[in-house]
Image (tube, rainbow, N blue to C red):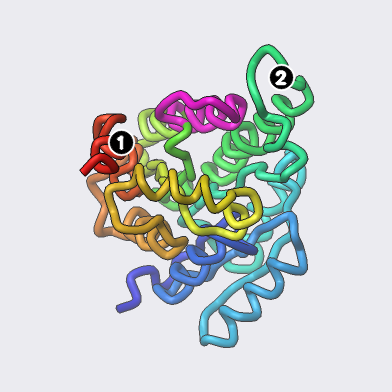
Amino acid sequence: MKTLDGKTAIVTGAASGIGYASALRLARAGACVVVADLNGDGAAAVATEIRAAGGRAEPVRVDLARADSIEAMVQAALERCGRLDILFNNAANTAPEVIGRDLDIVNMDIEVWEQTMAVNLRAVMLACKYALPSMLAAGGGVIINTSSASGLAGDIAMPAYGVSKGAVNTLTKYIATLYGKQGIRCNAIAPGVINTPALARKATAEQLEIYTAHHLTPSLGEPEDIANAVLFLASADSSFITGQILSVDGGLMNHHPSVAHFRALS
């Protein structure tokens, strides 16, 4: 069933992982999808795949560290697809040279902090800033932000990443509050550990075992699990849901910290 016929959606970070799965899912639902990514060739490949399956897609290379590039992305959506109804702010700075230096506060490299906030937080605000006028003029729209379990609780590493995602949660609530009466809905999705290419690059077998032990589901999540939630929040099926942080995390954040240890004793 085509639930998004006639709609246009921007998906950032759409060349791989959650963004890729979400772009395909929104396209199958009938949306014209703007496949946006820093990897221009990757964005073009995803758009080609969507078109080959009978969908509509437009690739856009976007540098989320630059305001003019974000504005151009939104303008491209309006020019190529004719309108903008859905904005999925999914991309984050997960480059190894950044994440690998996001260790603790005392030893925080200021450049790492600034780069993380620029892409994970400022870019989300700017995409909303440039997308909202056309949405408001059309009578409404949907904004979905990718948060993280790291934005809901402290951890022993990656404080810049976690703080950026916590701020995304607050920004989500502000957007929903400021523009709700004008037809704008804004929600965030907080994934658990998802089997993405980025995870495969950075996680060891021992770390994956720990992650799995602390999820309540038998296995870790897949990008399609998040894509299904994105489609739900983008569609009229969620018309009375706004300002929420939806945890799609296999129960990661919903149990006592000791559960995995006690389970190992049995």
Magenta range: 151-170
Question: Type of residue at label 2?
Answer: Met
Mark 1 vs mark 2, CA separation in Å: 31 Å
Residue 110 vertical position relative to residue 21 in the rendered view, above or below: above
Classed neighbour count for the residue bearing mark 1: other residues with Cα under 10 Å, few (<14), some (14–19), many (≥20): few
The residue beneath circle 1 is 261
Residue 67 vertical position relative to residue 235 in the rendered view, above or below: above
- Work out which quarter of the rendered image holds the C terminus and state it: top left
Residue 17 vertical position relative to residue 160 in the rendered view, above or below: below
| Residue occupying the point 29% across, 42% down | 264
* Residue 38 found in image quarter: bottom right
Label 1 or label 2, whichever lies nearer to me, is 1
Question: Type of residue at label 1?
Answer: His
**Residue 169 placed where, x, y %?**
44, 31
The residue beneath circle 2 is 108
| Residue occupying the point 56% across, 60% down | 17
| Residue occupying the point 77% across, 40% down | 97
**Residue 208 placed where, x, y %?**
49, 50
- SS under mark 1: helix
Q: Is residue 78 visible?
A: no
Q: Is residue 188 magenta?
A: no
* Residue 198 found in image quarter: bottom right
- SS under mark 2: loop
- Work out which quarter of the rendered image holds the N terminus and state it: bottom left
**Residue 221 placed where, x, y %?**
40, 57
**Relative to 242, 54 lies left or right:** right
**Relative to 88, 245 lies left or right:** left
